[in-house]
Image (spheres, coloured by chain):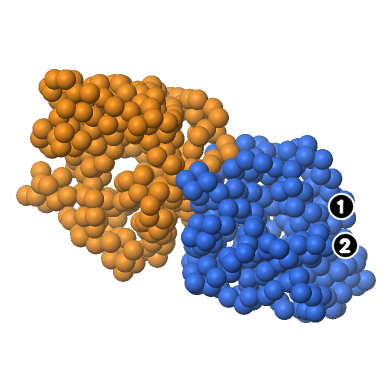
Chain colours: A orange, B blue
Amino acid sequence: MSMELVTGGAGFIGSHLVDALVERGLKVRVLDNYSSGKESFLAQHSSSEMVEIVKGDLLDSEVVISAMEGVATVHHLAANPDIRLGTEVTNTDLEQGTIATYNVLEAMRLTGVGRISFSSSSAVYGEAGQMPTPETYGPIMPISLYGASKLASEALITAWVGTFGAQGFIHRFANIVGPRGTHGVIFDFIHKLKSDPTRLEVLGDGKQEKSYMSAEDCVRSMIHIMDIDEGGANMYNLGTGDTCSVSRIAEIVVEESGLDDVSIEYTGGSRGWAGDVPKTYLDVSKLLQTGFEPTAASERAIRETAKALIGEIGL
Amino acid sequence: MSMELVTGGAGFIGSHLVDALVERGLKVRVLDNYSSGKESFLAQHSSSEMVEIVKGDLLDSEVVISAMEGVATVHHLAANPDIRLGTEVTNTDLEQGTIATYNVLEAMRLTGVGRISFSSSSAVYGEAGQMPTPETYGPIMPISLYGASKLASEALITAWVGTFGAQGFIHRFANIVGPRGTHGVIFDFIHKLKSDPTRLEVLGDGKQEKSYMSAEDCVRSMIHIMDIDEGGANMYNLGTGDTCSVSRIAEIVVEESGLDDVSIEYTGGSRGWAGDVPKTYLDVSKLLQTGFEPTAASERAIRETAKALIGEIGL
């Protein structure tokens, strides 16, 4: 029986993908360095023979090559999950994004694994001049180091497809939210409320507006696309077709926290930090035309995530 | 007096850029590892105080940082020039392209140099579904490792502009031809005729069709754009607005060789090698709207290059 390899499979979205692949009856190998992933995210599979866990780093080529044994498809999700980090540390996205993807592709080439599914990001679009933004939008000018590493990884994949004949699926994610989240605005808000239940500081003016998709819908759509699509390089925006503002997220988190009299305060400015894109709104017509339907729109995905993370983090 | 830094300044296009910058009265520092550049390409400046040459590698961060001293603008041209290499060696474009660009940008950030001009390539477009191809074309899916490294470098530049406030000029080159060429189809044809003056083997069916621009027009247009443009990240296709087929290039080279009875033979297939794009045709309206006019169309650029390279290589 062939094997699905999930890099970053102990991470937030990765562990949801492992759940979904196992639910389909597929054997899964996880390769994760636990830099942001957690053993507890895969605890539900600890007694299962369907999931094999390899602790290892994608920057170690030998580890990556040996993880390819028997693999039909590589689901490459491992990356630095913290977009903001690039404003202070510039080599993380290059190494854990671009170079790690190179190592994955090179290991695939050397071992004859021919199929890769990659978690890219709406961050590749930078400040797009067209909203909602379709996959055909150009020129693509990311403004964060994270977005740059995602675009670089996409380019490596299409080059490998074009030069060595692999098949590639590139998924440009909206903001993905859900249980086991380890970063992002909802996660940050809950931690802020935990340390001070009387006030919630919001980076920027709160008018930043983005698409939010539940992790469950996200991994379901990834698998759906790979089931129906053929050909070399495939690219899809994955999102819900709507947006939610950061100030609305703050309100939802406060509502779900059950706390009274929280003062929501804004640091001001159109973006949360340098490289933050004030508005992202993905055109997901191509995804919807495949027959896929998200179960939760942005607000619902946010509210359910707030509930789940408040349970995980505690308040 | 401030300094222009030209990485790859001893290379083919780099040395033409050095000539043009010096002609403008600017001081130039060249940083080159002479992997494909040649000392002879800068011999015309050997007694000049306007040109300083540093032999060093962009993968050596300390060298790059010290080369930034007093620099106003970095003209980043250093890269592996051989697109075909990526079909056999996969790490060259990653290292000499993507990582080298990262090192340049990081050195700029650390030393406060705020302006970069970058030689990208039509190879970023891969097999574009729109001809001529404008800068706004998407999705961008390079099919060569070279093209992937150019797109990755573009993304790093726009990310640095978006995050750290630099100014960037991204020039997507057509095929650039001219004296001092060290690679490419005209160069290859002359070397083939030199080793066997009776036959000329053409990779593919000869119907590959691309835009060719003279190196002189290329560097002139790079400087022209930087003179007129403002703002953060700027992107331009640089080309001539026409194309020439590989079979026509073979004919021109044979004509200029003065050889009789050369048999032109085709290996067949639509592309010269895996990752070769059969047709590239850049939309250069944006360039032309700036008032720039190329002096030579594709065929003329090719014929003049054939003359010059036959003189350099000998037959």
Residue visible at 50% across and 34% down in the picture: A127
Question: Mark 1 belongs to which amino acid?
Answer: Ala
Q: Which mark is residue B296?
A: 1
Residue visible at 39% across and 30% down in the picture: A268
Mark 2 lies on residue: B304
Q: Position of residue B173 (x, y in %)?
A: 69, 52
The answer to whether marks 1 and 2 sit on the same chain is yes
Q: Nearer the viewer, residue B97 or B23?
A: B23
| Number of numbered discs visible in the structure rendering | 2
In the rendered structure, the residue with mark 2 lies on which chain?
B
Residue visible at 37% across and 55% down in the picture: A89
Task: Find residue B144 and report its image quarter.
Answer: bottom right
User: Does dot 2 land on a helix, a strand or a loop?
Assistant: helix
Q: Are marks 1 and 2 in contact (CB under 8 Å)?
A: yes
User: Does dot 1 land on a helix, a strand or a loop?
Assistant: loop
Q: Is residue A133 left or right of residue A13?
A: right
Q: Position of residue B146 (x, y in %)?
A: 57, 59
- Whole-angstrom CA distance, mark 1 to mark 2, is 9 Å
Residue B62 position (above or below residue B113): below
Q: Nearer the viewer, residue A68 or A41?
A: A41
Task: Find residue A26 and report its image quarter.
Answer: top left
Q: Position of residue A17 (x, y in %)?
A: 25, 41
**Mark 1 residue crowding within 10 angstroms, few (<14) / some (14–19) / many (20+):** some
In the rendered structure, the residue with mark 1 lies on which chain?
B
Q: Is residue A2 left or right of residue B3?
A: left
Q: Position of residue B137 (x, y in %)?
A: 61, 37
Residue B116 position (above or below residue A65): above
